[in-house]
Amino acid sequence: MRPDGRTTSEMRHVKIEKNYLIHPEGSVLVSFGDTKVICTASIEERVPPFMRGQGKGWITAEYAMLPRATGQRTIRESSKGKVSGRTMEIQRLIGRALRSVVDLDALGERTVWIDCDVIQADGGTRTASISGAYAAMVIAIDKVVKEKELTVLPVKDFLAAVSAGINTDGEAILDLNYAEDSTADVDMNIVMTGKGNFVELQGTGEEAEFTHQQLLDMLSIGKTGIENIIRKQQEILGEELTALILSGVK
Amino acid sequence: MRPDGRTTSEMRHVKIEKNYLIHPEGSVLVSFGDTKVICTASIEERVPPFMRGQGKGWITAEYAMLPRATGQRTIRESSKGKVSGRTMEIQRLIGRALRSVVDLDALGERTVWIDCDVIQADGGTRTASISGAYAAMVIAIDKVVKEKELTVLPVKDFLAAVSAGINTDGEAILDLNYAEDSTADVDMNIVMTGKGNFVELQGTGEEAEFTHQQLLDMLSIGKTGIENIIRKQQEILGEELTALILSGVK
Amino acid sequence: MRPDGRTTSEMRHVKIEKNYLIHPEGSVLVSFGDTKVICTASIEERVPPFMRGQGKGWITAEYAMLPRATGQRTIRESSKGKVSGRTMEIQRLIGRALRSVVDLDALGERTVWIDCDVIQADGGTRTASISGAYAAMVIAIDKVVKEKELTVLPVKDFLAAVSAGINTDGEAILDLNYAEDSTADVDMNIVMTGKGNFVELQGTGEEAEFTHQQLLDMLSIGKTGIENIIRKQQEILGEELTALILSGVK
Amino acid sequence: MRPDGRTTSEMRHVKIEKNYLIHPEGSVLVSFGDTKVICTASIEERVPPFMRGQGKGWITAEYAMLPRATGQRTIRESSKGKVSGRTMEIQRLIGRALRSVVDLDALGERTVWIDCDVIQADGGTRTASISGAYAAMVIAIDKVVKEKELTVLPVKDFLAAVSAGINTDGEAILDLNYAEDSTADVDMNIVMTGKGNFVELQGTGEEAEFTHQQLLDMLSIGKTGIENIIRKQQEILGEELTALILSGVK
Amino acid sequence: MRPDGRTTSEMRHVKIEKNYLIHPEGSVLVSFGDTKVICTASIEERVPPFMRGQGKGWITAEYAMLPRATGQRTIRESSKGKVSGRTMEIQRLIGRALRSVVDLDALGERTVWIDCDVIQADGGTRTASISGAYAAMVIAIDKVVKEKELTVLPVKDFLAAVSAGINTDGEAILDLNYAEDSTADVDMNIVMTGKGNFVELQGTGEEAEFTHQQLLDMLSIGKTGIENIIRKQQEILGEELTALILSGVK
Amino acid sequence: MRPDGRTTSEMRHVKIEKNYLIHPEGSVLVSFGDTKVICTASIEERVPPFMRGQGKGWITAEYAMLPRATGQRTIRESSKGKVSGRTMEIQRLIGRALRSVVDLDALGERTVWIDCDVIQADGGTRTASISGAYAAMVIAIDKVVKEKELTVLPVKDFLAAVSAGINTDGEAILDLNYAEDSTADVDMNIVMTGKGNFVELQGTGEEAEFTHQQLLDMLSIGKTGIENIIRKQQEILGEELTALILSGVK
């Protein structure tokens, strides 16, 4: 039994609120329990300099936390004048993960800017961000498809992310909240497609190690969590878009 | 008649949602129409180096916008590595305004950190920020009073801010939305106490001028707006706190 | 009676020394008592990227203080690697103020760079800067008019700035020196055209408030100060230029 | 068969040159084929502020590449004035990995600074860095043990890192050089202890996915590579130190 | 004959105006022809961290140019957010030069901050800066001697700087103005004490070379220039201070 | 007799190892005793913006030290986010020195990037850098001559640099190591061509002075050192390239 009563392989309540803001092409408010992230997707009709003229699109992500998303106020990165290593790792991860399920050639020479702003943090902010950003991105890309009359939806599969860890009893647990994350020996982030393939796998045992069997256990419960989140994405995207995406999965 | 049907001296719908986040000592979501700002107040049990040992408190503010709070995505100041002049002006304004209604000696050697994060912008973000930040600050200070058993609530009066301008017909209008702000000749921000005194007055006619009479007109409708907002603050702070604050007004 | 013997509505001695430097298109050394500012105006035959191709001109300002302009040495902003919020506010203010009296369309696609470098500070550095910068700007623009054979002088009116405040007796006082500024409850900067209209009005009561009547008093003595400074501008610009500017005032 | 004639599970030639520089407490030049990294370990007799007074030690790492370590000259991060996201990820990874095999309590309140400077790059610079840094660190810590007469060597196990990937035929390959890395679909970095447990596992399929079976294949050949590198570490550390470390493995 | 009619070994008119500003402990306006520099010396009653507790003083210098000191406006280093290599070289040079003639032990644990701000540039700004800064420094140190009742004036000798070069005819010329500096093949800066010894010698032939004989010629006319400047320093410092300094020369 | 047994006019052992790295167009590892510097030369087929369209080439240099090149670890300039004044001085010196012996017109519109990375420091890192960089540059330019079929080798003469100083006995000594450099009164860097002309001369007596005779002594032993180093350059460049360079000396 975990502090909040969940079983080892149980997700927190996942909620994705669609069109949360009026300005962005796509936006959601995603919650994994008390972790809440505003995810927006913005379309820019050009690509970064290093990609120009190739006819391909690009997806890039930024991530930030409000100073009081956390229990203690954290200093704004704009005030410090630089982005922390942790933030950079997370935004690179979000961007890579989303690009893996988008057909950049079919997207055409435009950029999807993803912004994930954590307004309340209770563990799992990067996995909530990826899972919510996927939904915001699909909404924005769908708008492009309709406005620019693209012939295909350049999205190749569903995508979600979840965390797993090893608690102090050596057991694998799913979707750690902040209290669990602080005491867990191992922190694993799993990003998976709807088909069940890995896109990213990042496991780290700060001052600790994990065995091959523990790895397999975390991957197993992680898969359950991913499937749970993807069902929520399908609900808010609707039957038509869901069917369209599934029809393109190879 | 204005684009959204308001009269020249009519505010947009003002809404202040209390305890919007779980971590901060005080927090609200304030809306002036489609402008939405998360305002939090955090208590730190020390003051900046230049104030140490004087037994006085300090109040400081930071302000930011989510990249897609606006119609076009704006670049994050953390990515640019520096805070813009506009942001600095606004956060200095918020801090000064709030300090004017707090008895810093009675607050004791602690800092109230105010964070105003605009999640959706439609004009008037700085006036909504001040008006919401005041409420978040009072909630946080009230918590300090109770936890630290202070003998008085170190808040001297209510405080709110509103914008006024001169439209292209030369008329004074209240609480401009983004469309009005873009075409107005003059932009005036008024910060006032509950007693009706000025705390800040900033009027600027970018590439334009305004007459003494136009100034008086703007101040007159501004006062109406301020009273409207202060009523909303009193509603969410509740009768007891309101009475306590009013009892201290000199 | 004030510390230096002035009445409440009396300016310090205002002096504007023309063509102070050999290189700039326009330059003056302006003094308000012991406050001394080198103001230069430089013409650049292009505009910033965001304005290109519109056929309009631009005016931008920078402001700095020598480290020992002040009683205590202040650290250079170039050594700190960033410009302070105070500096940004002042340079934005100077630029906005000057743009309000220039016909940017008639100026044509060129930039006037204003540089205000305070070599000695005794209060009122921003108002001295605006008042001196106006003169340097007109000299430089007049040179452009002659060299490029523009058909009109693109200057719409005179412009000056002055400070006013409320002393500890509650009285309005004009053109505060450093000692007065440090003890005054309210600090008001007024920027006005020759015709007597407002261009900027910035009043702040750090940890204090001011009444409607006090505002009116400050505006009244401010107008007197502005008229005084504009007479000095007219003297150094000469009869011909003065007449030309006055002929264009609407 | 791979471009350089290796089998899929074959490492490049691994070489660790001991005491490469005269000044550092520990230093090696490590080569994985044409990839060459100078790894140094420096002892500082204090810890960062956030750790003071706990009696525990700290290990931190920095990583950089000479501009012409690469085929095309890369701009120095000191010239750009900031460290890239990639560099930050790598230095955080090196630090975390090394801390996992050091008993920080037994190390005492001192910091081991690891510097990995890539002088020639041909793929696998981060895995070579970790593998070489481990050796430099043990040499430096051993010096501390002797000079400060610590009662135990605070090193809990051997540690090495290796890369694996999936080539375009879908096969798992070990220790990718730059040419292979550029075309591989998946890039996996494995950090393991001498006992065979995971410390870090980072797999990413930029614009690609990998299956559960492919993951298992990469982990299997990775283990072979790790064992190969650890044998080299044991050779240069010598029998005595090796025995001492092995005696402490739990 | 040179463009401005000087002989090859003739200085421009050198002028040092004493007590140019009211706030600094020492200040001069120094002119070498049209080159004008405000030099101030500020006393701080402590030394930088790396020197604390040794009972010795420190002298440090900063150098800057107003944007329109030059024919073309130069961007402020505060706006660029960093100090250029040229500026750093000059300020390091000024500091080193001045320290060589001050008895830092006798100065006691205090810092002399030198600020050289070029308000008008026409070649030789660094040599004018050193020559003027020396005078400002002596004035400030003399004030310390009197206020703190030091038993000796901790100044060991006079100090001045001058430039020399090789013109396109191969001849050595003294104190180059901007036009000469732009066409000269070699640029030599000589810093000398009153006794005639070298403190700094920096000669550079950008894309050119100079012979041993040309070096001797430049040193010879440089000495004449130095003597000229030191006479001006002695005039403004007055007989008493001059005698005091000369009495301490070894 | 000096600490390491050298006579006052004796160089340390000079060694230049050719083609030290596989990627750069030119590279050497240069040693002056225990001082070791990796020097690389990279060819870029374009010039910086300020030189475009003139048909001329450019040479620019960067210099850095590994953190543990020194006895105490020095902080990386990339971590500090800015390049120190000392580093800037050195890289400007290296670039100027090399440009003086290259015919930039004959080089054509391309840039030679020089990178000097000190991997071990024991005094004289800047003179070793210049001397090694010259060799790396010639190798790279020779490659350009052959690949682009230039009609001449655009190198006008040999070039080397050496340090000299005045020891505490007042004697001139050549090629100071770190221990000598720390105690010497005067530090002189001499850059000379093969023909024996000066290209740069930088002498500084931090808190000390030097006489005209001491200057002549340092220049005399410096010349000996330069000739020694140039012989080593000729050895590694080979007879053919050496003859080609000598044939072009005017």
Image (spheres, coloured by chain):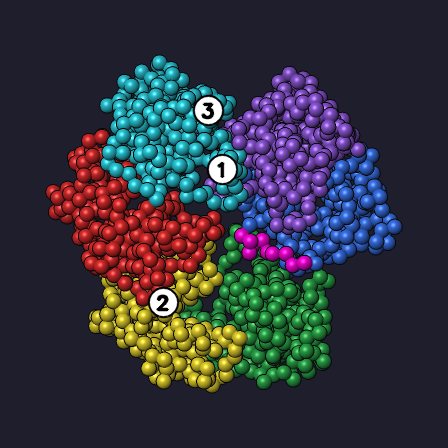
Chain colours: A blue, B green, C yellow, D purple, E red, F cyan
Mark 1 burial class by Cα count in 10 Å: few <14, some 14-19, many 20+: many
Q: Disc 1 marks which residue?
A: D76
CB within 8 Å, label 3 to label 2: no
Q: Which residues make up the magenta segment?
A: A72-81
> In which quarter of the view is residue E244 placed?
bottom left
Give the SS element for disc 1: loop
Residue for point 35% across, 13% down: F239
Mark 2 burial class by Cα count in 10 Å: few <14, some 14-19, many 20+: many
Residue for point 62% across, 22% down: D15
Can the viewer see residue E104?
A: yes
In space, the residues marked 1 and 3 are separated at their CA atoms by: 19 Å
Q: Position of residue E171 (x, y in %)?
A: 17, 36
Q: Position of residue D97 (x, y in %)?
A: 68, 36
Q: In the rendered view, would you say C245 is above or below D215? A: below
Label 2 resides on the chain identified as C
Q: Which mark is residue F29?
A: 3
Label 1 resides on the chain identified as D
Q: In the rendered view, would you say B63 is above or below E35? A: below
Residue for point 68% across, 46% down: D55
Q: Tell me the amino acid under the disc marked 1.
A: Arg
Please give left or right for residue E203 compared with residue A18 in the image.
left
> In which quarter of the view is residue C217 placed?
bottom left
Q: Quadrant of the C terminus of chain A?
A: top right
* Majority secondary structure of magenta residues: loop
> Quick check: do tags 1 and 3 share a chain?
no
* D51 is within the stretch colored magenta: no
Q: Which mark is residue A238?
A: none
* A75 is within the stretch colored magenta: yes
Q: Position of residue F142 (x, y in %)?
A: 38, 21
Q: Tell me the amino acid under the disc marked 2.
A: Ala
Q: Which mark is residue C121?
A: 2
